[in-house]
Image (spheres, rainbow, N blue to C red):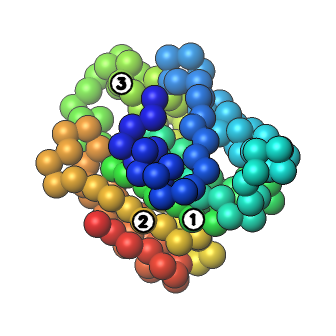
Amino acid sequence: RPGVLFSLLVEAGLAVATVDYRLSREAAWPAQYEDVAEALRFLRAHADLLRVDPARVAAAGDSAGGHLAAMLALRGTGPTAVQAAALLYAVTDLRDFDVSATLSPEELLASPEGLLMGVLPDDDPDRWTDASPISHVHADAPPTLLITGDTDLVVPARQSVRMHEALVAAGAGDVVLD
């Protein structure tokens, strides 16, 4: 559903594609990443018809969409690489939620993170780590804008703060936290 960001980008003359991806109640990770990566491959394969520059693609998203945009920015290669990312209150570390420590295993599996992963963190820590963008930070990350809110009740601001710190520490250039 296009929102304010979509409208602002279109008004600025940018081509914008919104991507539907399978939600956590429909499929477990990495289905969501595969969906957005496939959409990006489609966009590039049809760039002439769509009248977009395949060499100038950015990924943007908020919350779970920010998580996917971050994964494209940090893991994408070749046709799934992006040249910039805007991450709005993005989930950057699936294991860094206060509520996780207070939930029973059943409640954790029913949480958004548990539904996404389909397994408890202690049962497959590598899966949880691999699905967390902060685990893929590198010096060659594309320019990245991180936007967070001090009073966000869903995604703690520290998710963006820690991602910013990790990108800077890795030597990534052009990283902004707002």
Could you tell me how far apart the alpha carbons at marks 3 and 1 are, in whole angstroms? Answer: 30 Å
Question: In the picture, residue 73 is in which quadrant?
Answer: bottom right
- Tell me what residue is drawn at x 50 percent, y 17 percent: 25
Indicate left or right for 39 with 110 as reference.
right
Q: Earlier in the sequence, mark 2 or mark 3?
A: 3
Residue behind mark 1: 84
In front of the other: 44 or 146: 44
- Amino acid type at circle 2 is Leu
Residue behind mark 2: 145
**Vertical position of residue 160 compared to residue 22: above or below:** below
Residue 65 at x, y percent in the picture: 48, 41
Could you tell me how far apart the alpha carbons at marks 2 and 1 are, in whole angstroms? Answer: 8 Å
- Amino acid type at circle 1 is Ala
Q: Earlier in the sequence, mark 3 or mark 1?
A: 1
**Vertical position of residue 121 compared to residue 48: above or below:** above
Indicate left or right for 150 with 126 as reference.
left
Residue 90 at x, y percent in the picture: 39, 49
In front of the other: 108 or 148: 148
- Tell me what residue is drawn at x 20 percent, y 45 percent: 152
Q: Earlier in the sequence, mark 2 or mark 1?
A: 1
Badge number at residue 111: 3
Residue 28 at x, y percent in the picture: 58, 25
Q: Disc 2 vs disc 1: Cβ atoms closer than 8 Å?
A: yes
SS assignment at label 3? loop
Badge number at residue 12: none
- Amino acid type at circle 3 is Ser
- Tell me what residue is drawn at x 46 percent, y 52 percent: 11
Q: Residues within 10 Å of mark 3 (few under 14, many from 20)?
A: some
Q: Residues within 10 Å of mark 1 (few under 14, many from 20)?
A: many
SS assignment at label 1? strand
In front of the other: 178 or 14: 14
Residue 91 at x, y percent in the picture: 40, 46
